[in-house]
Amino acid sequence: MKRYKLIVNILLLFICSACVIVKGPEIKFDRSRQGALFSSGFKPNETGLLKTSGYYLLFDVDCANYLEGDGFRLWDDGAVSNIYFWLRGVSEELLSGEFMDAVIETGGVLFKDGNYGYSMGGIYKVEGDTLIIDRYFKDDNSWWHDYWTMEKKKYKIIDDGLFLMEISPDSCCLQDEIREKFCGDRFFRFVPASIFMNERFLGVKDAKWMWEDEAEWKTYRREWKKWRKKFLMGAYDEWVH
């Protein structure tokens, strides 16, 4: 009997240890490179230098056209939502705020956060006239761990925040025919909008190691769980208008 109890205890210990291993995230980057963490007092755009009521989209300054490719939205609390803009060659005059909302509603924008794949979002800070974004990616296909990686991007803020010029692009997510032209000198232009993916879908804010204070993270998690329960019951839409 004692032998069986010993075997059962060993099995239980193994299962518990395995659960911890499976659920434990693995950080695949040097955490000293992180530029910022979330907190209730973190307000990177307090001066209003950057625009947060719309999207920054890839822009051809020579032809005054918006290009198909990656873009993003900045939130006042420091969060970054990543998108992919599907349309190509849209003129500066055409892409107004009203038109941008129509593009979103007809599927012309792919939101790339949470269940929408690719990026889990990010966080930004401002140093002088430079915008610095830490973008985070999670590979949760591993049996043992969630693998987290980070990509750092820097942009020069131009024309009162209307334009951003990428300083040191790590990679290009453009079509082959425009890759060579824009990999070295990429501009992003702001487009106003009123439809956004709900910030609650940002997976990066759910990570405890992304917060300065564990107590604030726990508060966020409690509020997030309440929101998610109501969302699943149909009380909230996934879009913010």
Image (cartoon, rainbow, N blue to C red):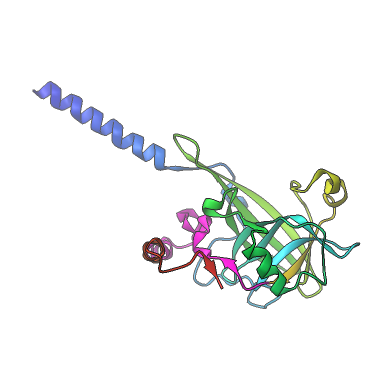
Residue under the point 24% across and 33% down: 12
* Residue 50 visible in the shown view: no
Magenta stretch: give its range. Answer: 193-222
Task: Give yes or no for residue 199 being in the magenta stretch.
Answer: yes
Residue under the point 58% across and 48% down: 137
The quarter of the picture where residue 159 lies is bottom right
Outermost residue on the left side: it is: 1
Indicate the position of residue 79 as horizontal and vertical percent values: 58, 64
Q: Is residue 145 left or right of residue 15?
A: right
Vertical position of residue 49 compared to residue 1: above or below = below
The quarter of the picture where residue 58 lies is bottom right
Work out whether residue 236 or residue 134 is closer to the camera in this orientation and state it: 236
The quarter of the picture where residue 103 lies is bottom right
Indicate the position of residue 96 as horizontal and vertical percent values: 75, 73
Vertical position of residue 17 compared to residue 72: above or below = above
Outermost residue on the right side: it is: 62
Chief secondary structure of the magenta portion: helix
